[in-house]
């Protein structure tokens, strides 16, 4: 079994991770300078009870550890409405290529069994080729220079990892949105074994390498995270 292991794990419902490096800049996609929006988003918001389910499941997995990737909406005390667990491009975005995915019977023993030449190179504006290896618990969207390059093909389970190849010119911007899926919509809980309200956990690992197999960016203590909701 091929696995990507990390020491970076955090709990989030939806989050955007970013880091700044000398030659590669990674930041939140679609960031706004609107001071009014920033002020409103910094104020506390409150909801009560579970959200209304709009989509019963985005992905039907009947193998080991099946989970329900529901989507719904919930009203805030100030009258606004949120999509929970998050607004995503899962249904419309280009799916990232499998590195390991039981749902598609892609189960290499290691990187030596992965033919990267079969992974198409996405044009993000430039000539230098980069390869990103991403594991999201549960879901991610990968951006370069504000352009959505790929989304996780599995919103919740089975746990999977992906590879994304793209060409860009340095310096460039990488943005990764991560979503920890919830089965108790609006409450942040999962249904785990005999626990109907399990807090769960979440995490995201990303490694970006150049054509010489040199690491140019990796999720570590330099990365920052912000938690938007809309």
Image (cartoon, rainbow, N blue to C red):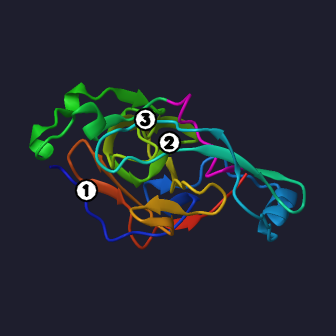
Residue beneath disc 1: 4
At label 2, counting other C-alpha atoms closer than 10 Å, the crowd grade (few under 14, some 14-19, many 20 or more) is many
Residue at x 23%, y 26% (from the top left corner): 118
**Marks 1 and 3 in Cβ contact (< 8 Å):** no
Position of 229 relative to 122 (above/below): below
Q: Does the magenta stretch include residue 86?
A: yes
Kindly identify which numbered label has been placed on residue 60. 3
Position of 81 relative to 10 (above/below): above
Q: In this view, does 96 lie to the left or right of 25?
A: left
Total labels: the figure holds 3
Q: Nearer the viewer, mark 1 or mark 2?
A: 1
Position of 169 relative to 67 (above/below): above
Secondary structure under tag 2 reads strand
Q: Can residue 131 be seen in this view?
A: no
Q: Nearer the viewer, mark 3 or mark 2?
A: 3
Kindly indicate the quadrant of the structure image that contains residue 55: top right
Secondary structure under tag 1 reads loop
Secondary structure under tag 3 reads loop
> What predominant SS class does the magenta segment belong to?
loop
Q: From the top left corner, tell me how far across and down residue 94 is, in percent.
A: 47, 29
**Reading the chain from its start, which is encountered first: label 1 or label 2?**
1
User: What range is drawn magenta here?
Assistant: 83-93
**Reading the chain from its start, which is encountered first: label 1 or label 3?**
1
Q: Is residue 74 left or right of residue 148?
A: right
Q: Is residue 183 visible?
A: yes
Residue at x 38%, y 32% (from the top left corner): 127
Residue beneath disc 2: 144
At label 3, counting other C-alpha atoms closer than 10 Å, the crowd grade (few under 14, some 14-19, many 20 or more) is some
Q: In this view, does 14 lie to the left or right of 200?
A: right
């Amino acid at each position: 079994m091929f696995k990507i292991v990390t020491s970076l794990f955090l709990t989030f419902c939806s989050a955007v991770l970013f880091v700044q490096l000398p030659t590669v800049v990674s930041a939140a996609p679609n960031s706004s300078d609107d001071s009014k929006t920033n002020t409103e988003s910094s104020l506390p918001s409150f909801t009560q009870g579970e959200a209304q389910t709009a989509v019963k499941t985005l992905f039907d997995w009947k193998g080991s550890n099946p989970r329900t990737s529901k989507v719904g909406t919930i009203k805030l005390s100030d009258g606004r409405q949120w999509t929970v667990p998050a607004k995503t491009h899962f249904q419309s975005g280009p799916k990232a290529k499998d590195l390991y995915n039981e749902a598609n019977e892609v189960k290499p023993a290691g990187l030596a069994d992965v033919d990267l030449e079969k992974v198409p190179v996405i044009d993000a504006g430039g000539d230098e080729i980069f390869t990103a290896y991403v594991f999201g618990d549960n879901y991610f969207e990968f951006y370069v220079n504000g352009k959505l390059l790929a989304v996780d093909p599995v919103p919740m389970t089975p746990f999977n990892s992906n590879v994304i190849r793209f060409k860009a010119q340095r310096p460039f911007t990488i943005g990764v949105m991560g979503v920890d899926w919830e089965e108790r919509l609006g409450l942040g809980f999962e249904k785990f074994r005999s626990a109907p309200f399990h807090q769960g956990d979440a995490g995201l690992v990303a490694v970006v390498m150049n054509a010489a197999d040199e690491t140019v960016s990796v999720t570590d203590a330099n990365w920052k995270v912000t938690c938007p909701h809309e």
